[in-house]
Amino acid sequence: GDSVTQMEGPVTLSEEAFLTINCTYTATGYPSLFWYVQYPGEGLQLLLKATKADDKGSNKGFEATYRKETTSFHLEKGSVQVSDSAVYFCALSDMNSGYSTLTFGKGTMLLVSP
Amino acid sequence: DARVTQTPRHKVTEMGQEVTMRCQPILGHNTVFWYRQTMMQGLELLAYFRNRAPLDDSGMPKDRFSAEMPDATLATLKIQPSEPRDSAVYFCASGPGQGKYEQYFGPGTRLTVT
């Protein structure tokens, strides 16, 4: 079945450092890809998405490019802030079920220190 | 800014009691999802609906959990009887459907069963 693999955390960075969180996927068909962010005590928030190969999703300084050839959707940010500390989830749309479900990775915790 | 709402935000109950969690999806969204999140299991899909019809509830224990959508503005998740192992954060999410796979999450209900 479809699956998403994320790098294990926590990822610990200093403020203004460059961020990369790796995400690779296994899927049949042509899924849409997503990044969600979860701050402590809150629900998951949609951060960005890409619906086809070579699409770049971007939001709040975060970017991710849909790479079909490497089945990857790595999340990047040029300069992180303390407020970016959260858990980040990569997800793909499940094309097998015929419905609108998502398959999530296990999440990567990001900790940014001043 | 349209959001998914959930009530209650926190619930503490004793083992054996009935628990009802409510969700108001975003107006116009035709898919609704219930998830459970724990440290051990991560994010689990319990059930989902399209146009108020249940599509799959294979993710939840049938003998004690039930999910319904009495109308388009209300989804409910009931646990009867509750057990300590049901302690978790329960999220509702809604999605626009119609070929769009993103989901929008509510803030969650934190359930503690003693």
Image: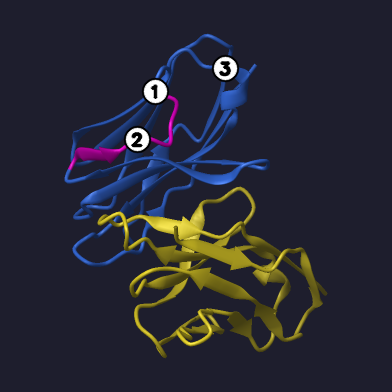
Secondary structure under badge 1?
loop
Callout 1–callout 2 Cβ contact below 8 Å: yes
Looking at the picture, how far across and down is residue B33, in whole percent?
35, 45
Q: CA distance from mark 3 to mark 2?
A: 19 Å
Looking at the picture, how far across and down is residue A55, in whole percent?
40, 88
The N terminus of chain B: image quadrant: bottom left
Residue depicted at 53% across the width and 84% down the height: A70
Query: What span is in magenta?
Result: B52-62
Task: Identify the image quadrant of residue A93.
Answer: bottom left
In front: mark 3 or mark 2? 2
Would residue A85 be found to the left or right of residue B99 on screen? right
Q: Which residue is mark 1?
A: B62
Would residue A10 be found to the left or right of residue B23 on screen? right
Q: CA distance from mark 1 to mark 2?
A: 8 Å
Secondary structure under badge 3?
loop
Looking at the picture, how far across and down is residue A12, in whole percent?
80, 71
Task: Name the tint of chain B in the rendering.
Answer: blue
Q: Main secondary structure of the magenta part?
A: loop
Query: Is residue B67 positioned above or below B91 on the image?
Result: above
Q: CA distance from mark 1 to mark 3?
A: 14 Å
Would residue B71 be found to the left or right of residue A100 on screen? left
- The amino acid type found where label 3 is placed reads Glu
Q: Chain of mark 1?
A: B
The reply to the same-chain question for discs 3 and 2 is yes
Query: Is residue B114 positioned above or below A20 on the image?
Result: above
Which disc number belongs to residue B57?
Answer: 2
